[in-house]
Image: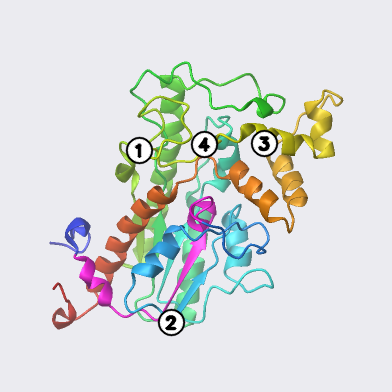
């Protein structure tokens, strides 16, 4: 069996006993676990990190626990901000680490307009390959500068959001009433629209995989792509009747049952009220909405929870984060086994 073909699925969980002293979880809101579990580091700016994020779950499965886990993933970050902020310390973010043995990385969604995807307005995808390669090569270079032996990067992909074969969603729209003055007329989840949006995730994964492959040419067995899409089979939107925000079997968030409360809260913000009431002829973009809500929720736990409800749409729930972590853990442990002597590979 070649190094590329080892069977992650058969990797025994007891292999967790490989000692890891320090590692780093980087990336965007998918890595930050937006909405999954409880918010941590509440006053970390706009990062909205949650304790159900797959890096946090992975850290809990590593035995013995690493002496240092650097959780620097941040909601809203893209290729430039990851390079500028997550690789450097600041007063709001911890540094990426002293000598991390490996890094997990989720990125690309914000660079193709993830917020527009959330509002079902994305129908095309740019090629994220070149900027991602820059991030990977920069991280590899930083690992080399620190002289970290066997330093690795694990890049996670994205899951398709929809079952695109069922028909029960053809006349369904996820748009809440309070979005009507921000968006075009309702977008219904027809089969064609679901196929288009799923293709976005497949194309993004293809770009990420290509970037990992190219970056790996000069660093064999150092950069890995984690494709967990198939783990979400049976847990996508439109697998069952929609809309059903409380369906535990669906592993993505949508706008919940508290839409009336969200609408009232948004209406209390003057700039948004002017639009909602028709006193203004302009509309509000998603980015503007986010900034207005962020300012209105500063240092207020109840209102900051409202911010999470607004922004977690199309992000994995806790069960989805668990599925990502399980796939990632198998790859991390199997790839570390390749570096170890045969006598140290415990399977009991």
Q: Label 4 crowding class (10 Å Cα cut-off): few <14, some 14-19, many 20+?
A: many
Which residue is labeled 2 in the image? 67
Label located before the other in sequence (3 or 2): 2
Label located before the other in sequence (4 or 2): 2
Q: Which residues are magenta?
A: 12-37
Number of numbered discs present? 4
Q: Secondary structure at mark 4?
A: loop
Which residue is labeled 1 in the image? 235
The residue at 84%/38% (across/down) is 270
Is 213 placed left or right of 143 in the picture?
A: left
Which residue is labeled 4 in the image? 254
Does 49 sit above or below residue 344?
above
Are the residues at dot 4 and dot 2 in contact (C-beta closer than 8 Å)?
Answer: no
The residue at 55%/42% (across/down) is 112
Is 283 placed left or right of 108 in the picture?
A: right
Q: CA distance from mark 1 to mark 4?
A: 13 Å
Which residue is labeled 3 in the image? 261
């Amino acid at each position: 069996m070649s190094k590329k073909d080892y069977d992650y699925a058969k990797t025994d969980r007891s292999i967790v006993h490989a000692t890891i002293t320090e590692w780093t979880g980087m990336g965007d809101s998918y890595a930050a676990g937006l909405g999954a579990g409880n918010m941590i580091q509440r006053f970390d700016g706009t990062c909205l990190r949650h304790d159900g994020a797959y890096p946090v779950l992975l850290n809990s499965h590593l035995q013995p626990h690493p002496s240092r886990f650097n959780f620097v993933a941040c909601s809203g970050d893209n290729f430039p901000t990851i390079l500028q902020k997550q690789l450097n310390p600041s007063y709001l973010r911890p540094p990426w680490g002293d000598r991390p043995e490996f890094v997990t990385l989720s990125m690309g969604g914000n660079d193709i307009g993830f917020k527009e995807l959330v509002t079902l307005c994305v129908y095309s995808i740019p090629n994220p390959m070149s900027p991602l390669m820059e991030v990977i090569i920069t991280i590899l270079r930083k690992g080399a500068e620190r002289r970290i032996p066997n330093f690795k990067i694990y890049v996670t992909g994205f899951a398709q959001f929809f079952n695109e074969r069922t028909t029960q969603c053809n006349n369904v729209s996820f748009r809440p009433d309070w979005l009507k003055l921000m968006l075009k007329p309702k977008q219904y989840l027809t089969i064609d629209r679901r196929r288009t949006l799923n293709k976005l995730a497949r194309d993004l994964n293809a770009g990420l995989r290509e970037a990992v492959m190219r970056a790996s040419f000069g660093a064999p067995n150092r950069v890995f792509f984690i494709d967990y899409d198939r783990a979400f089979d049976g847990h996508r939107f439109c697998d069952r009747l929609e809309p059903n925000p409380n369906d535990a079997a669906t592993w993505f968030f949508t706008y919940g049952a508290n839409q009336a409360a969200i609408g009232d809260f948004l209406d209390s913000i003057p700039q948004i009220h002017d639009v909602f009431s028709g006193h203004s002829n302009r509309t509000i973009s998603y980015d503007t909405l986010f900034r207005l809500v962020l300012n209105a929720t500063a240092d207020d736990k109840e209102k900051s929870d409202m911010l999470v409800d607004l922004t977690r749409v199309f992000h994995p729930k806790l069960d989805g984060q668990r599925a990502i972590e399980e796939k990632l853990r198998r790859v991390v442990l199997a790839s570390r086994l390749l570096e170890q002597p045969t006598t140290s590979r415990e399977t009991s």
